[in-house]
Structure formats: structure tokens, C-alpha cells
Image (tube, grey):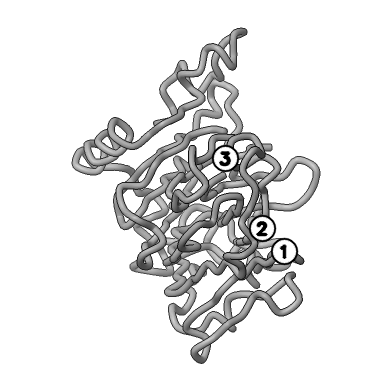
Amino acid sequence: MASPSTSNLSPKLLLVSLLLGSFVVASVGNLYQDFDLTWGDGRAKILNNGQLLTLSLDKASGSGFQSKNEYLFGKIDMQLKLVPGNSAGTVTAYYLSSQGPTHDEIDFEFLGISVQFYLWFDPTADFHTYSILWNPQRIIFSVDGTPIREFKNSESIGVPFPKNQPMRIYSSLWNADDWATRGGLVKTDWSQAPFTASYRNFNANACVWSSGSSSCSSTSPSSTSTNSGWYSQELDSTSQERMKWVQKNYMIYNYCTDTKRFPQGLSPECTATTTS
């Protein structure tokens, strides 16, 4: 796992990854309606009449939450403000995950190995929007509307793609100073605790999975909503150029170019250029 080279560096390293094994618009308003606080013994809180959610970490425990709904495809947006100050050793993870031994995951992980970026702004100074667009053709990760990674469906050449298992949204803030800071050489400075990450303005244009069926039609949700462009959305030429700019200037690791780590050959999606 990559990590900052000094203990006082703000967490600006972003890991985006996939672990593969009627149309509903969630309200932007009330986080009480959308999420359950799942662990942390009071360290996770919903504040301001449901407008703000915070996760905190101290030496005793971190904290986490999960969505009430499960989703099978969707456009998920959340504004996050990451832990400020000297937070070396802490990890904030925000991701979609299914359950079971062959579960799928679609991850944003801050300070965490698949694709890693240094962000082009200070993510601890203000809220920024982190988005996952997941449809049957592709998964697109975006930050403030700028795409940073695309993973295309290439099942035709044997590359797994998450399309059968519904996923919940999860987030957690936890201590990882045994690996996240120069392989564990730099330990979390607990005098800075509690560490707090903040969340607001959640929005899910998504197919909700309930009792074994989807709220979307079997083919697409377009017949039930005018806001379903995400179901067939792809990157236009302008978005592709923006993504190339980010990857050229801010990507610091891509498993599709790591021949030393994979001397027996890169994954099929790399040679087929299905992941960007």
C-alpha cells in the first residue's frame, strides 16, 4: 500500500479499485432515511436534522455506516470532507459492496492496489463530491464531476464485471498505521484525536434491490424516469480528455502498467485497454 512520505502530510492519496467476484431517486435531504450507523459506539453521528453525517476515530475505536438500501446499478454521489491535519495512519473508505464469499466491491479509499492518485486539491479543506456511475456497460469514478477512472465491461474476453449482486454503500474511518504509513514505520499521532470525516448531500439515482427484485425494469429504467441517462452513459470526448489529464498529472500507480508486480502477465482488461 502506498502512503505519504511524512507524518504531517494531509490525506490526499486516493485509491480507486474494484474487487470482482421502477427507477428510484433517493432524496438528497435526510441522511436518517438513507443510512444506518453500524459501529463505533457513538462515534458515528447524524447531525443538523439529518443534513450531516460524521465518522470519528480515537485510540479505542473507529466508526462506520451503511446504506439502508441495496442497489444494482446506479449513479451515486456523496460530498466528503476528509480528516484534517496530521492524520497519517488513518484510512477513510467509501465503497459499494455485496455480501458473500464471492462478493464485489467498488471502492474509493483515501490514504490507503489498483489505481492511485494524488488529488489536485486539499480534500480536508472543504467538501468535494465523489461519484460512482455503475451501469451494465461500465463503471466510472469521478471527483467533482471530473472522471478519473473508467472500467469497461469486457466479459466477452473473460473479465469479471459486477452485474448480478446488489450492493450496499458503506463507509468507515479506521486506524491502519500498521501498513498505511511507510509500511507501518510512522504511527498514528493519537494526541490529534479524535479524527473526524464528514459527509453530506448524498444522492442516489439508482435501481433499488428489494426482496429479490429490482425497482428498475428488466431492460432499463428509462420507461419509469426521465433522470435515467446514467444507465447507458459513457464518456464523451471532452470527458475522456479530462480523464487523460488527471491520469497524466495525478495518477501515481496503475496495476495495468506494473509488469514487475505481475511478471506472468497483466490482467486481460489491461491488454484489452478496458480499464482507464
**Residue drawn at (46%, 37%) of the image:** 116
Q: In the figure, residue 248 lies in which quadrant?
A: top left
To which residue does mark 2 refer? 174
Q: Label 2, label 1: how many angstroms apart (C-alpha)?
A: 10 Å
Residue 230 x, y percent position in the rendering: 38, 55
Crowd class of label 1 (few under 14; some 14 to 19; many from 20; radius 10 Å): some
Three-letter code for the amino acid on which mark 2 is drawn: Trp
Q: Disc number at residue 59?
A: 1
Crowd class of label 3 (few under 14; some 14 to 19; many from 20; radius 10 Å): many
Residue 272 x, y percent position in the rendering: 44, 19
SS at badge 2: strand
Three-letter code for the amino acid on which mark 3 is drawn: Leu
Q: Mark 3 or mark 1: name the one nearer the start of the chain.
A: 3
To which residue does mark 3 refer? 18
| 49 to the left or right of 251 | right
Label 3 with label 1: CB-CB less than 8 Å: no
Relative height, residue 37 to residue 209 (above, below): below
**Residue drawn at (50%, 62%) of the image:** 83
SS at badge 3: strand
